[in-house]
Image (cartoon, grey):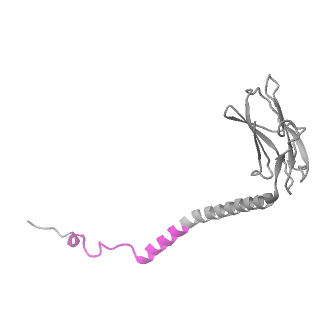
Amino acid sequence: MKILDISTNLGKGAMKGISPIIATTIMIIAVFGIAVIIVPWALELTRTTTTATANTTQTELLCQGAGLTWDTTYGSSGLIWNLTGSSDSLSAKVINSGMVSLWGFSFELQINRTIYRFEPSYESQIGQANPLRPGQSAILIANITEDLPDVLESVRIGNRQCPAITLNQEV
């Protein structure tokens, strides 16, 4: 049996690869091509992460002295509600007990293990232009636009200025 030697049949120089200079050039072009894609993405990721971290840190520092309490002289521990019938109503009296002005309040009502979210009525909403200053109190009236079940379990009041500062009341 005769074994065939391929290298002798192809002739001299047939098994050569590409030159090292061409291989290096192709490698450099590939690296730059990948860098053109990755570098802008990495820069944008760094920028957005830095901005988000700065905003979070600024809010946390600002809200360190924030506080909110119920005015227990109002209704039942700061709340008055009527969920019977078709014209449901809920109001709360809150006091800014901290050192930071608060604004942008909202209600979360828990009824039958379901959370309902409401903004205060236009007349009682406290906005950024006219916030609830330290030591001030305000009556917030929920803008309830639907007929809710009768059994109110809890009320939570939040604000946009310092989202971590909330009031919770089991009823």
Compared with 101, 88 (above or below) is: above
* Residue that appears at 88% across and 45% down: 126
Q: Position of residue 2 (x, y in %)?
A: 10, 67
Is 49 magenta? The answer is no
Q: Relative to the observer, which residue lies in front, 65 or 15? A: 65
Compared with 86, 132 (above or below) is: below
* Residue that appears at 90% across and 52% down: 135
Q: Quadrant of residue 85?
A: top right
Q: Is residue 20 left or right of residue 127?
A: left
Compared with 62, 163 (above or below) is: above
Q: Relative to the observer, which residue lies in front, 56 or 15? A: 56
| Span shown in magenta | 6-32
Q: Quadrant of residue 93?
A: top right
Is 29 magenta? The answer is yes
Q: Relative to the observer, which residue lies in front, 81 or 74? A: 74
Q: Quadrant of the C terminus?
A: top right
**Of helix, strand and loop, which mostly describes the magenta segment?**
helix
Q: Position of residue 100 (x, y in %)?
A: 85, 56
Compared with 10, 65 (above or below) is: above
Q: Position of residue 10 (x, y in %)?
A: 24, 70
* Residue that appears at 79% across and 24% down: 84
Q: Position of residue 61 (x, y in %)?
A: 78, 62
